[in-house]
Amino acid sequence: MTEKKGLKDAYSLKTPEDSVNLYKTWASTYDDDFAKQNDYRSPIEIAKFFAQYSNDEDTPILDVGAGTGLIGECLNLNSKEIDAIDISPEMLNIARTKNCYSEIIEADLTKRLLINDNHYGAIVSAGTFTHGHVGPNVLDELLRVASPGALFVFTVHFKLFNKAGFDKKLLEIKKNITQPTFHEVDVYGSNPDKEHGSDQVIITVFRKK
């Protein structure tokens, strides 16, 4: 019998290879074992702030680190094209079944993406800029594939915002983006986990100039 995965596993990742290996075995039960079990709110919050800041020009949308498609479900935008990108084929297979996405892209976000310059009108992401996943340098590549004026709405784990250098990266790219707006929100709802139940993320919002 396969051991049930949970929060401890999600926070134990250190490399892209770790992510591939974990999500290979977790994909089929991730929505229940992680999202529902922990009342995972980041995708809902991303959808909320996207609705607040977006306009009709913010399309197509790229869901970065889409996983099983939780943001796609929350956005529920039939009028806009949304593509999913993730390193885990197993997670993307689950996302595909939800019929939220126009295209499914399997890729390592730490490498150059096979996507044309200035292609996307919006970039959204939840739970990707966190422990053991990807760091702030990915923003350079995401800016490349985003069109001028593209809206960015993504979460950064609160404890990593300064520790991992997201604050420095935003200063480094400030000439290429509008002044960021930040919103601190809880990652989980009713979650009794002593170590991570009260975790927060910083939802970062800006546009590419």
Image: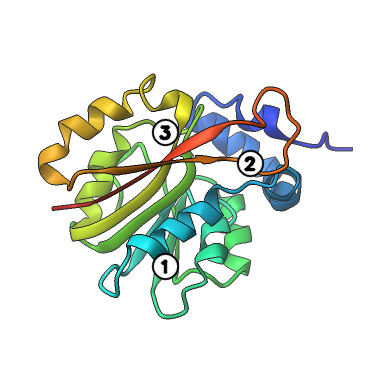
* Residue 138: quadrant of the picture: top left
Residue at position x 83%, y 34% in the image: 3
Q: With respect to residue 59, does 132 lie above or below?
A: above
Give the left or right position of residue 19, taking residue 137 as reference.
right
Give me the C-alpha separation between circle 2 and circle 1: 25 Å
Residue tagged 2: 188
Residue 135 visible at all: yes
Q: Earlier in the sequence, mark 2 or mark 1?
A: 1
Q: Looking at this view, is 17 or 121 the one in front?
A: 121
Residue tagged 1: 82
* Residue 83: quadrant of the picture: bottom left
Kind of residue indicated by mark 2: Tyr
Q: Which label was assigned to residue 185?
A: none
Residue found at the very far bottom of the displayed protein? 79
Residue tagged 3: 134
Within 10 angstroms of label 2, few (less than 14), some, or many (20 or more) residues? many
Residue at position x 32%, y 39% in the image: 111
